[in-house]
Amino acid sequence: WSFIFSTWARAQARKPGGRVGPELTSLTKFKKYVLWDFMRIEKAKEITGSLSKPSKMPGHAYGLPAKECKTGRLLQKKKGSTCYGCYALKGCYVFKVVQAAQYKRLKAIRHPLWVRAMTMQIANKKTKYFRWHDSGDVQDLKHLAKIFEVAKRTPDIQHWLPTREAWTAKYQDRAPENLKLIFSMPMVNQEAAGGWNYTSTVVTDPSKATCPAPKQNNECKSCRACWDKKVKNVAYLAH
């Protein structure tokens, strides 16, 4: 039985868009997901690098080096932009060990097993919410497509993908139902604009901020606005 099951699962995994998780939930109550090719968690971490667990958030996250943001690195030099004085370019983020881990993750994106490994890692955390890029951003279309695929393979997890890459607009309607692609407006106090399904803004007036974190020890607590598709725009207080 073990050999037959393994062979069948691998065959399914090789199919374009093949999914071996949700269909088997009723057959394998001891596992929520059948892991692609039965990859071990140690191998997955070796491929993708580890996930982070921001104390503010209800789930795990995945960060890349902020210096490698395509649009962000230009905005980092522009006073008045939301990237000016970027938090991911100071504090613990500049430690050598953190930078090494982020650049390892950046390089890993091109690994042929990256999607499987990320699926394994996220599913293994048994979390309901996941944030992409607490530092860094989408690199290119191939990277975006891979993130979409990971979300498809973890349908019971809500994914939040913030970005400042305007080119992603033409692909926002291809995002899986459980992934919220949010365009972050580039300038402080800039109104939400453009043909985006979901946006975020940064404001200096506390009365206009909708993110409750500053009022609750900089934590999300019960708020899930960044993952909730009923919320079209989230306004963060500048810090």
Image: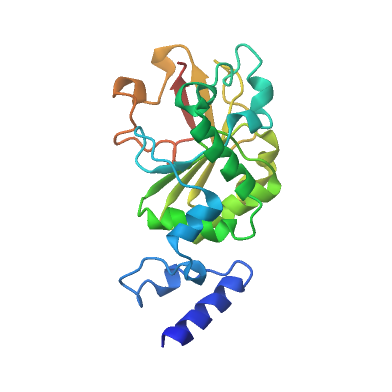
Please tell me which residue lies in front, 236 or 98: 98
Foreground of the two, 57 or 3: 3
x and y percentages locating residue 69 in the rendered image: 64, 32
**Vertical comparison of 3 with 75: above or below:** below
The residue positioned farthest toward the front in the image shown? 96
Residue 184 appears left or right of 207: right
**Along the line of sight, which residue is nearer the eye, 30 or 129?**
30
Task: Tell me what residue is drawn at x 48 percent, y 80 percent.
Answer: 6
The foreground one among 116 and 150 is 116
Quarter of the image with the C terminus in it: top left
Q: Residue 72, image x and y in percent? A: 64, 27
Q: How many numbered discs?
A: 0
Q: Quadrant of residue 76?
A: top right
Residue 180 picture location, percent across and down = 51, 43
Identity of the residue drawn at 62% across and 49% down: 109
Residue 176 is at least partly visible in this image: no
Indicate the quadrant containing the N terminus: top left, top right, bottom left or bottom right: bottom left
Residue 208 seen in the figure: yes
Residue 51 lies in quadrant: top left
Left/right of residue 183 with respect to residue 40 in the rendered view: right
What kind of colouring is applied to the model shown? rainbow
Residue 126 appears at what percent x and percent y? 35, 55
x 54%, y 61%: residue: 116
